[in-house]
């Protein structure tokens, strides 16, 4: 006969806590409102801006997604602008990852990738020094940051960034705001999302 599954004292306290899930629902509703505010702001920021985009790019497309299992943690995200078509990606993702961070990421792949890379290197000092990081992961869907996962875009790392970019079939530039950052408490996340998008425009404009 199999041994029974025994709950630890910490697990039993969690199971008995009737306040957690109502609190989680309130938090996730506030996250949704935050993402919707980001979408409204980005809509204004996109108006009249000329972008280098793949064919069939539609600047009005977006998606809002909610899930429970990003490496075992709940999440929500907004993709806006949003373009996925075969091997083409031109997407700005605003991601909330429970227990981790708000992440604002520009993900690029497809026919204009070489131009995006050139823009980043040729305009490097317009983009550097703004708390942005280049993902080192083999997939755009890895969201961890720090040593081994991301490379900070500081003014002294231009040659290192160029070397990393040279062999990549996509690249992702992201800004991370930890969930315990005072900016989250103070309601500044939508402003940071818009600021991040504007800081990335030198990469995707002619």
Image: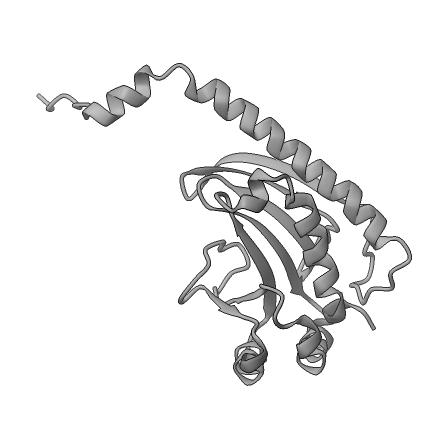
> Is residue 167 toward the left or the right of residue 54 in the image?
left
Residue in front for this viewpoint, 152 or 85: 152
> Is residue 131 toward the left or the right of residue 3 in the image?
right
The picture places residue 106, in percent across and down from the top left corner, at 65, 59
Query: Which residue is farthest left?
Result: 1
Residue at image position (64%, 50%) is 93
Specify the quadrant of the image occupied by residue 110: bottom right
Residue at image position (61%, 40%) is 186
- In which quadrant is the C terminus drawn? bottom right
Q: Is residue 27 above or below residue 56?
A: above
Render colour scheme: one colour
- Total labels drawn: 0
Query: Which residue is farthest bottom?
Result: 159
Residue in front for this viewpoint, 166 or 92: 92
The picture places residue 161, in percent across and down from the top left corner, at 55, 78
> Is residue 131 toward the left or the right of residue 15 in the image?
right
Residue at image position (55%, 81%) is 156
Residue in front for this viewpoint, 121 or 126: 126
- In which quadrant is the N terminus drawn? top left
The picture places residue 194, in percent across and down from the top left corner, at 72, 52
Specify the quadrant of the image occupied by residue 117: bottom right
Q: Is residue 198 above or below residue 206?
A: above
Residue at image position (71%, 56%) is 195
């Amino acid at each position: 006969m199999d041994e029974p599954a025994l709950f630890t004292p910490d697990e039993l306290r969690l199971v008995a806590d009737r306040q957690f899930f109502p609190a989680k629902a309130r938090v996730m509703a506030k996250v949704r409102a935050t993402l919707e505010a980001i979408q409204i702001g980005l809509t204004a920021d996109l108006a009249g801006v000329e972008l280098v985009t793949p064919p069939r790019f539609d600047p009005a497309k977006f998606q809002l997604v909610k899930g429970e299992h990003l490496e075992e943690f709940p999440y929500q995200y907004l993709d806006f602008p949003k373009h996925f078509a075969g091997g083409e990606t031109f997407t700005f993702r605003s991601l909330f990852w429970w227990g981790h961070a708000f992440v604002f990421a520009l993900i690029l792949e497809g026919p204009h990738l070489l131009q995006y890379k050139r823009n980043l290197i040729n305009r490097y000092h317009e983009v550097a020094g703004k708390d942005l990081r280049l993902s080192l992961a083999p997939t755009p869907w890895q969201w961890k940051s720090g040593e081994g996962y991301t490379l900070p875009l500081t003014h002294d790392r231009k040659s290192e960034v160029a070397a990393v970019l040279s062999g990549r079939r996509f690249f992702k530039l992201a800004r991370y705001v930890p969930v315990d950052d005072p900016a989250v408490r103070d309601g500044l996340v939508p402003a940071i999302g818009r600021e991040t998008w504007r800081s990335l425009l030198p990469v995707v404009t002619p």
